[in-house]
Amino acid sequence: MRKTAWLAAGLALLLAGCSGGGGKVNPQLDAEGKSFVLKGVSAAEKVSQITGADSPNKTDRFAVYGTDLGSMINDGDKTYFVFGDTFGERAADQIGGGGSFWRSNTIGYTTDSNPADGIALDGMIADDIGLAKELLPSKKVDYDEMTKIPTYGIAANGALYLYYMSVNHWGDPGKWDANYASVAKSTDGGQNWTLLDGVKWPGDSNFIQVSPYKVQTGEDQADIYFWCIPSGRFGGVQLMKVAESDIEKADAYRYFAGIDAKGQPIWSADLAQAKTVVDDTVGELSVVWNPYLERWLMTYLKEGDGVVIREGLAPWGPWGDPIDLVTAGEQPGLYAPFMNERYTEDGGRTIYFTLSLWDPYNVYWFKTSLEK
């Protein structure tokens, strides 16, 4: 009985530490006493091509000749690669989005756990004849709903959740208008999706494109943090969170509204109270916890310059200065640098990420090493 009591007490202390209640504070949520340690990154290296007829995956067999984005969702031993506007046929010399057999979104999947030689897709979510199918249908009507673009997803509560934006109109480079942002749910491994129309953010808000990450707060409890930007590539980053169990409840989301006198984050139910945590021109962001640095990492497109990486001491910051990851001169037409905590080496010192190239409008696999 005495041994059982000691074990129970130890478990209680552990859970208190994870939640920050009276024990050791979760290092992912605590900036106190930390300093920036990321000094730079090695020259980014293109490892392989993931999509397209010229890729090792030969995705044209799924009628995926051209596509972009490539954010990732981990679920068990499977990783889903989520793509944006996808085309089955197009001219060999065509640049950018376009072509026939247009689908607003598609998903590939893999159990490949070795990132060093590229990503081998096991397949794609497909229709009855084996062609990659559109998961979230859109109207495809300009100035109404041009497309539904997936921004990021996460596995939670035994299901898959895919956040997306309903695009009203593509404008000048780096600018577009959104009707709203929302989320869809799949309970069958991504084969079918249900739109959760009760969870939406206004098209003019700062919560149109998101990057989620799950932080454990107890043995069977977690909060999901979302770093968020407006439509387009010219806004800063704001932050929201929700308990994993409440992910389908719109009124359960809380918005970072600043720091109190004790240095603790303030969370508001009112998105109008949200504060900017990274003030920059941010496009297609990705945020993960890095075990090598024991810091947060954020990658994004800085329009006109290229892709950058920043280090964060806590989800709300402070965030370090941007460091060039891949410049526009090195890879013209680059965008959408998405990381995944699963794909690292050397304890997180080497990180892998997807990168989209406007010409030839496909997704590539890159890597870099962190210097501290």
Image: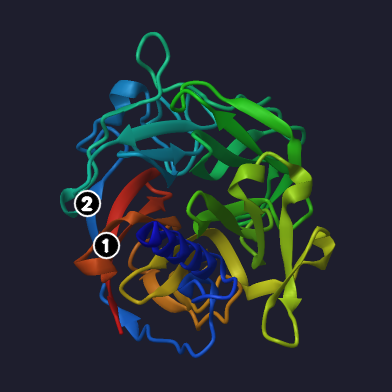
Secondary structure found at label 1: strand
x and y percentages locating residue 340 in the rendered image: 37, 54
Residue type at mark 2?
Pro
Placement of 103 over or under 284, stated as above or below = above
- Rendered-image quadrant of the N terminus: bottom left
**Residue 115 marker:** 2
Q: Which mark is residue 221?
A: none
Q: Residue at x 24, y 68 (%)?
A: 347
The local crowd at label 1, few if under 14, some if 14 to 19, many if 20 or more residues have their Cα within 10 Å, is many
Amino acid beneath label 1: Lys
- Give the quadrant of the C terminus: bottom left
* Pointer 1 residue: 367
Which residue ends up furthest to the front in the rendered image?
Answer: 1
Front-most of residues 1 and 8: 1
94 and 54: which is toward the camera: 54
Coordinates of residue 260 in the picture (x, y in percent):
75, 82
Question: Is 131 on the left-hand or right-hand side of 19?
Answer: left
Mark 2 crowdedness (10 Å alpha carbons): few <14, some 14-19, many ≥20:
many
C-alpha distance separating marks 1 and 2: 9 Å
Tell me if label 1 and label 2 are in contact, CB under 8 Å.
Answer: yes
Measuring from the top left, give residue 257's x and y in whole percent: 76, 71
User: Which SS class for mark 2?
Assistant: helix
